[in-house]
Image (tube, rainbow, N blue to C red):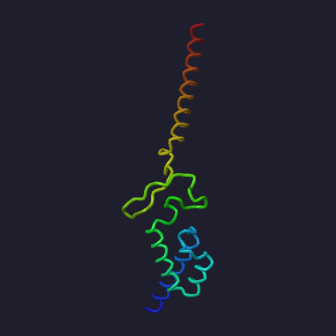
Amino acid sequence: MPRILLILVVVGLAAYALADVWGSDEDERGGLPRWLWVLLIVLLPLLGAISWIVVRVAARRSGAGPSAPGSGPGGGGSRPTPPRSPRPGPRRPAGPVAPDDDPEFLWRLEQEKRRREREARGSRDRDTQDDDV
C-alpha cells in the first residue's frame, strides 16, 4: 500500500508540474525552454517536478512572471500592472468580477432604464392628450 501511495504522489506531482510548465511564461522558466522542462519532468518525474517547483517559486519571489512590471512580449507592457502585495495570497482578477461591478455595464443599464422611463412618460402623455380631446 505505501508503494502505491508513493507512486500516486510522484505521478500527481509530475502531472501538476507538467500543467504548470505548460501554462508558464518564458520569464518564469529559469532560462530553459518549455520543451526541456517537459523532458526533464517526464524522464525524471520526482527530481524534474521538484526542481520545476523550486525554480517557479524562486522566479515568483524575484519578481519574474505575469505580475512583474516589464514582463511580457513587449517588455514594457501595454497595460499597467497592479502593485504587488507584500503578503502572499490568491491573486485578484484585473477586471470586474461580476456584471454589477462593471462600470460600463452599469452605465448601459442606467441608460436603458432612462430610455424606458421616457417611453413610458411619452405613452402616458399621449394617453392624457387623447382623453382631453
* Of 79 and 114, the residue lying toward us: 79
Where 41 falls versus 97 (above or below)? below
Res. 1 visible in picture: no
Residue 105 position (above or below residue 69): above
Which sits in the foreground, 108 or 81?
A: 81
In the image, residue 92 above or below residue 2: above
Q: Quadrant of residue 84?
A: bottom left
Residue at x 57% of width, y 52% of height: 78
Rendering coords of residue 93 (x, y %):
49, 55
On the image, the x and y values in percent for residue 118 come to 56, 24
Seen at 53% across and 83% down, the residue is 48
- As drawn, the residue found furthest toward the top would be 133
Identify which residue, 127 or 49, lies in the foreground. 49
Q: Position of residue 82 (x, y in %)?
A: 46, 54
The reply to whether residue 65 is visible in this rendering is: yes
Number of marks in the rendered image: 0
Is the N terminus in the top left, top right, bottom left or bottom right quadrant?
bottom left
Q: Position of residue 66 (x, y in %)?
A: 52, 62
Residue depicted at 54% across the width and 78% down the height = 15
Image quadrant occupied by the C terminus: top right
Outermost residue toward the right in this view: 35
Near-viewer residue (115 or 10): 10
Q: Is residue 103 above or below residue 115?
A: below
